[in-house]
Amino acid sequence: MPIDKSVFIPVDPDTAFSLITEPERLRRWHTVAARVDLRVGGGYRWTITPGHSAAGTFTVVEPGRRIVFTWGWEGSGPADGSSTVTIILEPADGGTTVHLIHAGLSVEAAAGHTEGWIHYLGRLEALAGTGDAGPDDWAAAPDPINELVSAEAALAVAQRVLAGLTAADKDLPTPCAEFTVSALVEHLVGSISGIGKAHGAELADDADASPEVRVANAAAPTLEAFNARGLEGAVDMGFAVLPATTVANILNLEFLVHAWDFATATGRTLEASPVLADYVLGLARNTIAPGMRGKSFAEVTLVEESAESLERLVAFTGRQVSNA
């Protein structure tokens, strides 16, 4: 049963093609993370929402005109990969009509995918029309959740803040006393990359890219490799052999706590679900040992009893919350 949907967006076909194929653009409306090898026979992997990644192969690539790719949910078995998505870009007065056809779905699968495409095509319209689709509510509070699913949700939060950083922000101090904004970006990229390398991920860093792109380029392959490995056993990090769950916990803290650091340093508002913040606070309590205080983490700071989940999390990591 095919899905057939069209939306109009006020951009030219070449820009529309970029919005539906380039990882940096896809992260603005459709994905948490994206790997794209844009050629016939090339593959892709898109983390649509935390814990749910689609993968497939491009079969037609016509820049500015059309793209066709196979579609399947990772971990759902080969039968899911039999569906095909075709996106046709048609020039229209003042912009482009984006025509999407998703064929090869069962009746049951078509119902869920229809809801999904309506949601994401609406976000594409918002991005093209206003420049910002906003945070994706579907990515905010994953259920069910585990250490890797929450890390993907925390990454989505971090990327919203990182995307807003400008060159004027780079020398601002952050709540991490030893780090300016630019130094904290370097720390974050290095920490994620270290975890990725321990999992055999192929990483490439462009120091001239924006902070959001640099973090995304480290995070996407790291999370893909980590998901392929799973949470069982231990990981040799070079400096120590740690339980895989502990390494995943560290990723959560790197993404969400440093997102708060960047937002606080630049006077921006951080939007994070209390469900996610509460979960990551639980991970922090299982990860930050007393002996780490005064070294990797400062002592716990006090917050008001009415403090929100995110404030309690950052206070536990030693940050000073302004309303305490």
Image (cartoon, rainbow, N blue to C red):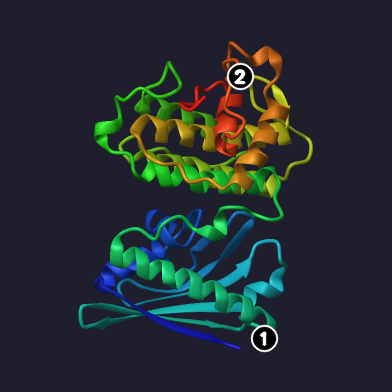
Whether residue 47 is visible, yes or no, is: no
Q: Nearer the viewer, residue 317 or 170?
A: 317
Q: Residues within 10 Å of mark 1 (few under 14, many from 20)?
A: few
Mark 1 vs 2, N-terminal side: 1
Q: State left or right for residue 204 relative to residue 83.
A: left
Residue 240 marker: none
Residue 140 at x, y = what percent?
56, 53
In the figure, 106 relative to 211: above or below?
A: below
Q: Residue furthest left?
A: 94
Contact (Cβ within 8 Å) of mark 1 with mark 2 = no
Question: For mark 1, what is the residue?
Answer: 107
Q: For the image shown, how many numbered marks are present on the structure?
A: 2
Question: In which quadrant of the rendered image does the N terminus lie?
Answer: bottom right
Residue 231 at x, y = what percent?
74, 42
Amino acid type at circle 2 is Val
Q: In the rendered image, which quarter is residue 243 located in? A: top right
Q: Residue furthest right?
A: 233
Q: State left or right for residue 321 relative to residue 294.
A: left
Q: In the rendered image, which quarter is residue 183 located in? A: top left
Residue at 39% x, 61% y is 133
Residue 185 at x, y = what percent?
41, 31
Q: Residues within 10 Å of mark 2 (few under 14, many from 20)?
A: some
Residue 300 marker: 2
